[in-house]
Amino acid sequence: MASIVVVEDDLRIREMVSRVLADQGHDVESAGTAMAGLERIVKGVTDLVILDLGLPDLDGGELLTMVRAVSDVPIVVVTARSGDAEVIRILDAGADDYLVKPFTSGQLAARVRAVLRRGTGTTPEGPTVVGGLTLDRSAREAMLDGNPLDLSPKEFDMLFYLASHAGEVITKRDLLAEVWREPYGGSEGTIDVHLSWLRKKLGESAAEPRYLRTVYGVGVKLIDPEP
């Protein structure tokens, strides 16, 4: 059983989602506004958030940013907004999954199970260190040679995943599945763009790599440049 907060302004949808999750054995609280949802999310132990974007008092994307500033709780966005740019924006802001309305109760339950299942994996204790690169997942902080790195949520998630599998070649499809939560779709161009941004922030380039090495036709791997 998980503790789930549903933030949705449409009463009919809110009741339907809450009922589906309760029938799955979860402890569900709900709110019709962003601020009421934020209060419920931070007041206790929350295992998952279901978040609508079209809220009456605050855009759901802003609430997502507020929650991400204080918590790594998994967030599944459910919304009628289906544009590719909007999906990318919300996932980059820290959402764990994105479900477009209308959806079936079965789809919702499956997404919730998948996100909760991912959250049960073992997280390494302490920071992840590769060479001069240090990443603290719990604090969502990254350091390079003792200097802080200014990373977006998805840049951090991508770098942390690569660092956690240092030396392994990771395919773009793996990154889409594990970082963007898009195992059956998504643009590999998104990976290329984020890799380019990460290289700049790490002080390297594709032509002169240090940490991020491209394995052409296969994927990318993160290595210790000075083993």
Image: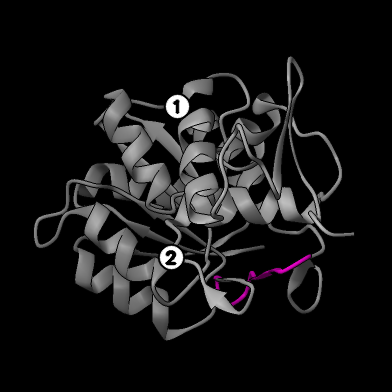
What range of the chain is rendered magenta? Answer: 131-141
Front one among 143 and 209: 209
Q: Secondary structure at mark 2?
A: loop
Q: Residue at x 27, y 34 (%)?
A: 86
Q: Residue at x 60, y 19 (%)?
A: 184
Residue at the disc numbered 1: 104
Q: Dot 2, crowdedness within 10 Å: few (<14), some or many (≥20)?
A: few
Badge nearest the viewer, 2 or 1:
2
Residue at the disc numbered 2: 150
Front one among 14 and 208: 208
| The furthest residue to the bottom | 43
Say which amino acid is labelled 2. Asp
Tell me, for residue 178, which label it has, or none.
none
Q: Looking at the picture, does residue 101 appear above or below residue 121?
A: above
Front one among 184 and 221: 221
Image quarter in which the N terminus is found: bottom right
Q: Residue at x 41, y 46 (%)?
A: 92
Does 135 appear in magenta? yes
Say which amino acid is labelled 1. Thr
Q: Residue 66, image x and y in percent?
A: 31, 69
